[in-house]
Amino acid sequence: MTWPRGASAGPEGPTVPAPAGVAAVAAGAEVAAGWSVGLDVGGTKTLGVLVAPDGAVGPSVRLAARRGGDGVAGTAAEAVRVLVAEAGLPAGSVAGVGIGLPGIVDPVAGRVEHAVNLGIEAAVPLAAQVSAALDGVPVRLENDLNVAALGAAHLLPDPAPDLAFLALGTGLAAGLVLDGRLRRGASGVAGEIGHLVHVPGGLPCPCGQRGCLEQYASGGALSAAWPGLGDRPAPVALFEAADSGDAGAVAVRDRFAGAVAAAVRVLLLTTDVAHVVVGGGVSELGDPLLRVVRARLDDEARDSAFLAAMHMAERVTLAPRGVPVGAVGAALVGRKES
């Protein structure tokens, strides 16, 4: 699948050039307000991107993370200033800033709590802190999976009013866009499919259950089953070993692919979304991951006319490489396009 809005495929994956408006601003031309900045905040880095009024994706920035409420807020404000300066935008051009981050996020109050990876436990009024540091620019918060889903929907080449973003990271969960809007759920946990029981009585999960899907289909589960060697990531080491014919690696890879396929099947059977976009650290494997998951879905469809009619394998794709999907989605939140 290719990705639009000026995206082009290269050896490192799709790239999105800066919109024409950036060059115009740098030359001193007048532009309308409506630019937004999106930030994807993680435990080790903050990714930021500038999005033009027409939705085109512009320059990006990557800054090392700082822990705690003050550290996160300071890094966020710094990222916005860097992007605005790099684009040569005049003061007042940024209409809003969106921030996607883990933890329990209250989008209405602009607070985040229990973001352990960020060094945040008690509730922090992060939106207000960042806004104050940026002289009152509106700032909105959203869960990191939700902004990734929004970003993926924005970048797909065809309209995507229904989409699930399946994140294969340390854990496993999905962000949902249904009928063109985020689906957070009554208590904010829509898409937490990682805690559906996949293997009754199976591996223990920190949530207190046993056999949760997260224990078989996440990057953390894969690393536990097949640790990487030296500085080579576990997914890369596993897939290379499987390709070389290592029977143990083949077994681990196939079990992982089956669990990811189960996650895809759950999302499609419960929401019937048009696309399941696979992201997170494991998705960096690229086509080899996509091939084994699609093959597993096709295998299961051979025994079921019902599943075959859903064309599940065709509805799975990978998040674009080289494009900060979560930051793009956060920028849409910042401009109230959520």
Image (cartoon, grey):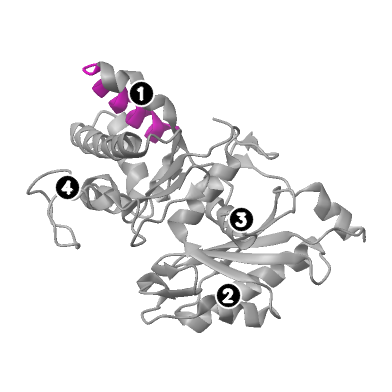
Measured Cα–Cα span from mark 3 to mark 1: 31 Å
Tell me the amino acid under the disc marked 3: Leu
Q: How many marks?
A: 4
| N-terminal-most mark, 1 or 2 | 2
Mark 1 or 2: the one toward you? 1
Q: Residue at x 38, y 28 (%)?
A: 291
Asked whether, in this view, residue 248 is left or right of residue 270, the answer is left
Vertical side of 169 occupied by 10: above or below: above
Res 97 visible: yes
271 or 94: which is nearer to us? Answer: 271
Number of other residues with Cα within 10 Å of mark 2, as a class: few under 14, some 14 to 19, many 20 or more: many
Q: Are marks 3 and 2 in contact (CB under 8 Å)?
A: no
230 or 138: which is nearer to us? Answer: 138
Tell me the amino acid under the disc marked 4: Val
Q: Which residue is mark 4?
A: 197
| N-terminal-most mark, 3 or 4 | 4
Q: Is residue 16 magenta?
A: no
Number of other residues with Cα within 10 Å of mark 3, as a class: few under 14, some 14 to 19, many 20 or more: many
Number of other residues with Cα within 10 Å of mark 1, as a class: few under 14, some 14 to 19, many 20 or more: some
Q: Which residue is mark 3?
A: 332
Main secondary structure type of the part rendered in magenta: helix
Tell me the amino acid under the disc marked 1: Met
| N-terminal-most mark, 2 or 4 | 2
Q: Are marks 3 and 4 in contact (CB under 8 Å)?
A: no
- Local SS, label 3: helix
Q: Position of residue 95 (x, y in %)?
A: 72, 65
Q: State the extent of the magenta-drawn residues as a range.
A: 287-304
- Local SS, label 2: helix
Q: Which residue is mark 2?
A: 75
Q: Which residue is mark 1?
A: 310
